[in-house]
Image (cartoon, rainbow, N blue to C red):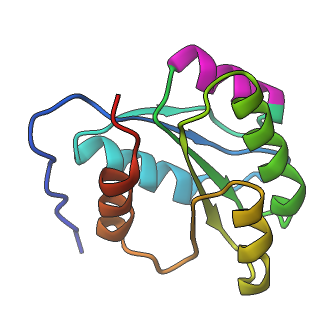
Amino acid sequence: MSTAITPLPSRNKIRVLIAKPGLDGHDRGAKVIARALRDAGFEVIYTGLHQTPEMIVQAAIQEDVHVVGLSILSGAHNALVPEVINGIKGAGLTDALFLVGGIIPDEDFVSLKAAGAHLVFTPGTSLEEIITAIDKNAPKR
């Protein structure tokens, strides 16, 4: 079964960083998201597995991204997400849209949003929903 992704209208590209912080070694979901975003017309930078928060901060700053998507399946989201968000904002990229995806218990949504995550996606979220959310909420520069 193939899902067709509708490309975005021609306009300035939204730059999205997809990162896998920590020791989580499962990247299939992150790769599916990265490819769907690329097919929809976003400019996507994928960092690969086992990134430290510092590595993600540096990539976000160097690439001047509009969106930072963190894919976490390890359960370390409450520790890693705030560290990445604080690092990116502290480095001066204050208008980025922060997304978190993965195995995130409902009770952790509030603390992740308090830490600066704008949107949290869990398994079963459609690719179109993620694409629409980014297109609607990414900062316009």
Q: Residue at position x 71%, y 85% from top? A: 106
The residue at the point 77 percent across, 51 percent down is 81
Magenta stretch?
Answer: 54-63
Quadrant housing the C terminus: top left
Q: Quadrant of residue 87?
A: top right
Q: Position of residue 97 (x, y in %)?
A: 52, 46
Nearest the eye: 1 or 45: 45
Q: Is residue 52 visible?
A: no
| Residue 2 picture location, percent across and down | 22, 68
Q: Position of residue 96 (x, y in %)?
A: 54, 38
Judge left or right: residue 137 versus residue 82: left
72 up-or-down from 85: above or below: below
Q: Residue furthest bottom?
A: 106
**Residue 9 magenta:** no
What residue do we see at 45% from left, 76% from top? Answer: 125
Residue projecting furthest to the left: 9
Using residue 96 as the reference point, say whether residue 13 is left or right of it: left
Please provide percent x and percent y for residue 118.
Answer: 58, 59
Q: Identify the residue shown where x is 75% and y is 51%.
A: 25
* Magenta-drawn stretch contains 56: yes
Instruction: Identify the main secondary structure in magenta.
Output: helix
121, above or below 79, in the image: below
Left or right of residue 12, residue 64 in this image: right
- Tell me which corner region of the image, top left, top right, bottom left or bottom right, holds residue 1: bottom left
Q: Would residue 113 be visible to someone looking at this image?
A: yes
Please tell me how many numbered marks the rendered image carries: 0
Q: Taking 91 as reference, is 7 above or below it?
A: below
